Image (cartoon, rainbow, N blue to C red):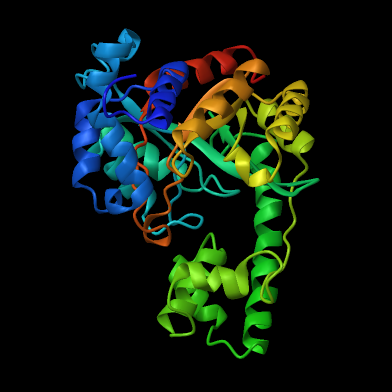
Amino acid sequence: MARGVHTEDAAGLAGLVVLGLQVSWHVVRRAASSRVVRRNRAARHVSMFAHAQALTREDGVIYMLGRRLRGEASVIDLHTHSTVSDGTEPPARVVDLAAAAGCTAVALTDHDRLDGLEEAADRAQTIGIRLVPGCELSCVSATGGMHLLVYFVSATSQPLADSLTRLQRARDARNAVMVERLRQLGLPITAEELHAEAGGIGVGRPHMAAVLLRNGAVTSIEEAFDRYLAQGRPGYVDKERLTPPDAIALARASGGVAVLAHPLTLGLSWGGLDVAVRELAALGLGGVEAVYARYSLEERSRLAAVASSAGLATTGGSDFHGAYKPGLEIGLGYGDLAVGEELLLALEDRRTRGGG
């Protein structure tokens, strides 16, 4: 073991090799200057990268050296949200931020909506970055909720587009019920304020949290969810969702590839998750989002192993929402995110084989 390198850090670096992540020193330098690396976890990961040369020199992890650590490799971000759903930045601005972070490609994956893809695609073409068009579908599962990212679809992709229109109407009705429930709790919020916060479309719970914060009912977005908006809290109302089989079938019928988003939110044991992923793979799932900003390097590595054992692609992204998720940056996550371009190539290969 290299001197001064923690065992968990070594395991994390090995995980990066397994994942094929392209970790470059320019990413490390950006992470070191980011305000979020002052957080304990992110700071530890940046410290880990500082030891990378010593680790590779003494333990022979040569595979990670060369062009990856010299900054010659590209990074991408396959999970972002805009004002079209529950983000705070317009679609074109999301693309600008991705380019500024050094990404060669970015996916716009708004919740149950495809409305922002045209604006994002126009901006991407103008500035010379690749847009991966997509969305994030809300599904119901045995454990409560499941999200599936769908890639390579457009606003005209059928039958997905028609299904999303129906879900959007159902979400509008649910939002009205939630606002009324919050008002019955004595909280300062109106439908007009909510629509103004969201910009008129894609209203969701983060917008409700922002209104409550601005009106002094809570001190943070997180508090709004913890006290009122999260599942099981007094302001929460469930929404209509697709089943995973229906969502995967819609994705494939529309020319897309479905990927399990942030898998650990399912609340399953590692063994249970392995079984669930295999069952989804049998339905036509194309990949697993292993390289997720909130996950540790060990978790990312284990998720990549789950994906590999099921014969699925591995993807990754920040889950950027702008100001609604403070400190989370496109392409960088919380300071240690580096999603390799080869993961997108593997996803494209899934597409050519019919999405599964």
Q: Position of residue 176 (x, y in %)?
A: 66, 74
Q: Position of residue 227 (x, y in %)?
A: 59, 75
The residue under the point 58% across, 18% down is 351
The residue under the point 75% across, 38% down is 244
Determine whether 34 is above or below 14 in the image. Answer: below
The quadrant in which the C terminus is found is top right
The quadrant in which the N terminus is found is top left
- For the residue pair 58 and 183, the one nearer the viewer reads as 58
Q: Position of residue 349 (x, y in %)?
A: 54, 13
- Furthest residue in direction right, as rendered: 142
Q: Position of residue 86 (x, y in %)?
A: 49, 58
The residue under the point 53% across, 35% down is 154
Determine whether 262 is above or below 206 in the image. Answer: above
| Quarter of image, res 283 | top right
Determine whether 167 is above or below 184 in the image. Answer: above
- Furthest residue in direction bottom, as rendered: 186
- Left-right relation of 69 to 303: left
- For the residue pair 151 and 116, the one nearer the viewer reads as 151
